[in-house]
Amino acid sequence: MMKRLEDYVRSIPDFPEPGIIFRDVTTILQDADGLGLAIDSLRSMVKDLDYDLIVGPESRGFIFGVPVAYAEHKGFVPVRKKGKLPCETVSVEYALEYGTAEIEIHKDAIRPGQKVVIIDDLIATGGTTKAMTSLIEKLGGQVVKICFVMELAGLKGRELLDGYAVESAIIYAGK
């Protein structure tokens, strides 16, 4: 019997705190069939879509975004934590549950008018992804789709991305 992508996700109860079920993506990565299913799922999300580039955040967005970019013959643009990129950058600060974080992208990575797909492993609250959309748009890019391997629907991240086309391979109802 063919396994589903969900079958490759390890669920760890009460981590990092009681009542939370941690969805571990590493068990998808370490199994060739699971990894293939994940990449194929993401590729199906962009099938017949008109776009120029894939953007992914450090580090799991790199893991899932680069193979899709390669297979679809598109460029890949990394979004990194502040201070990690060597050339001139634009950055944005965004709120975390406790405190703030800052991400950046090379200033010349996206040209005005380019159509961009964002790929990441997980959407939770949506804060990082929303910050990425603002970086892309600041450079004149247009976000045409946002794709995730997993979504924690209970954290309502999709609501923060209202107005964008969002798709997830797996949707978990809880947090």
Image (cartoon, rainbow, N blue to C red):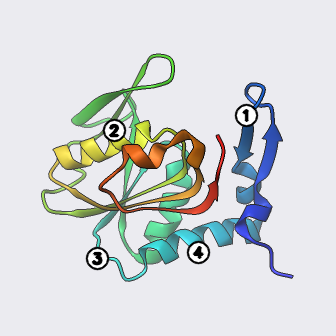
Task: Tell me the amino acid under the disc marked 2.
Answer: Ala
Q: Are marks 4 and 2 in contact (CB under 8 Å)?
A: no
- Image coords of residue 133 (percent x, y): 30, 47
Quadrant in which the N terminus is drawn = bottom right
Q: Quadrant of residue 40?
A: bottom right
Question: How packed is label 2: few (under 14 Cα within 10 Å), some, or many (20 or more)?
Answer: some
Q: Which residue is mark 3?
A: 50
**Mark found first going from the N terminus, 4 or 3:** 4
* Marking on residue 131: 2
Residue sitting at x 45%, y 16%: 99
* Marking on residue 105: none
Question: How packed is label 3: few (under 14 Cα within 10 Å), some, or many (20 or more)?
Answer: few
Q: Which residue is mark 1?
A: 20
Task: Tell me the amino acid under the disc marked 4.
Answer: Asp
**Mark found first going from the N terminus, 1 or 4:** 1
Question: Is 69 located above or below residue 156 in the figure?
Answer: below
- Image coords of residue 15 (percent x, y): 76, 31
Count of all numbered marks drawn on residues in the image: 4
Q: Are marks 3 and 1 in contact (CB under 8 Å)?
A: no
Residue sitting at x 32%, y 57%: 164
Secondary structure at badge 1 equals loop
Q: Return the residue found at the far top.
A: 99
**Can residue 57 be seen at all in this image of the molecule?**
no
Question: How packed is label 4: few (under 14 Cα within 10 Å), some, or many (20 or more)?
Answer: some
Task: Tell me the amino acid under the disc marked 1.
Answer: Ile
**Disc 3 to disc 1, how far (Cα)?**
38 Å
* Marking on residue 40: 4
